[in-house]
Image: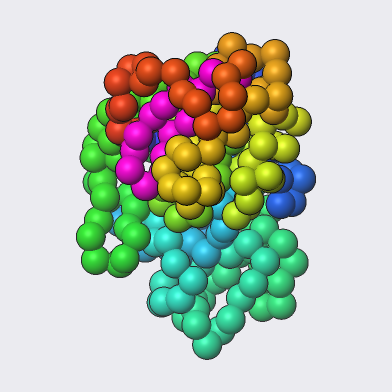
Amino acid sequence: MTWTELVMAAAPMQGDQPAVSDVRTGEVLSYAAFSRRVTRAAAGLQAQGLRYGERVLVDVPLGAALPVAVHAVAWAGGIAVLGSHGESRISITYDRYDPAAVKADLVFSFRPVPGARPFSELVGPAAVEFGPLAGPALTLDGSRLLDNAELATDLRRLATRLVVGKDDVLISAVSEPFRGLRTIDLAMTAGAHVVVAHEPSLVGCRVLAQERRATVVVAPPTTWPGGCWATPPCGSSTKGRSSVRLACEKCDTVRECDPSATQGEHMPDSPPAQPAGRAQPVRRT
């Protein structure tokens, strides 16, 4: 399976189950909708003349729209360039467009923006059934290219280090775009529900964990006062769950928190302090 195939693999089983919930916008993306938008937007990009290996600037924040934009480009055979400035024939944004920063002939936006066309124009009745088997798919800095095979291998490795299942609710408090995208990919490959938070405080994480009945939290160590895992979001916030796994965005450590323990206590690592590698596919709409 290719990178995007891994992420879409759970869609047939998960269907209308939520794949990504965006706390900032309130949008909930189902597995079926994700698969449909990716394959149809890929066809739309090809209809706009997107060539194999052509770069597409993607300036979209972490949330429900980012995986759609990135995987649509990859599924169409293009290379998604994560960034807010640069030059490319086609650019995809969320709710902003600065012609001085972005030099593009065609700009598509998820939200209405002067000078940009709606992203929905790309999502027509046609769909790309099979994406590229190999070749570059993503770049973070415009120089180093990550190909489909490398990204798929990374996702599989991550899935062995941070095990996520279809019944999990994963809160992503990750701030860096690529790490956040990997976290979403990981959850979706397993058929889980990922809730994307936006720069949450410690209290914010605890509230989200309680509201969403989270089983996994991925966050930077700065979220917890006193350093990595000093004060995990356990306790009453996870009432009804046997444990919550905490994955550190920065050091890739995975710990399990016993909700019945006093604040700050941990169960032994299970499995022992593992790095949060890469993930496997998920399908929902």
Residue 12 x/y as whole percent: 57, 18
Q: Outermost residue, bottom direction?
A: 100
Asked whether 253 falls inside the magenta stretch, the response is yes
Where 30 sits versus 132, above or below?
Answer: above
Q: Outermost residue, front direction?
A: 262
Where 95 sits versus 158, above or below?
Answer: below
Lateral position of residue 180 relative to residue 200, left or right: left
Where 35 sits versus 51, above or below?
Answer: above
Determine the residue positioned at 44% across, 18% down: 267
Residue 218 x/y as whole percent: 49, 37
Residue 214 x/y as whole percent: 63, 26
Q: In which quarter of the image is the N terminus?
A: top left
Determine the residue positioned at 41% across, 51% down: 178
Q: Can residue 16 be seen in this view?
A: no
Determine the residue positioned at 24% across, 66% down: 143
The magenta segment:
246-259
Q: Quadrant of the C terminus?
A: top right
Lateral position of residue 123 relative to residue 272, left or right: right
In the rendered image, which quarter is residue 144 located in? Answer: bottom left
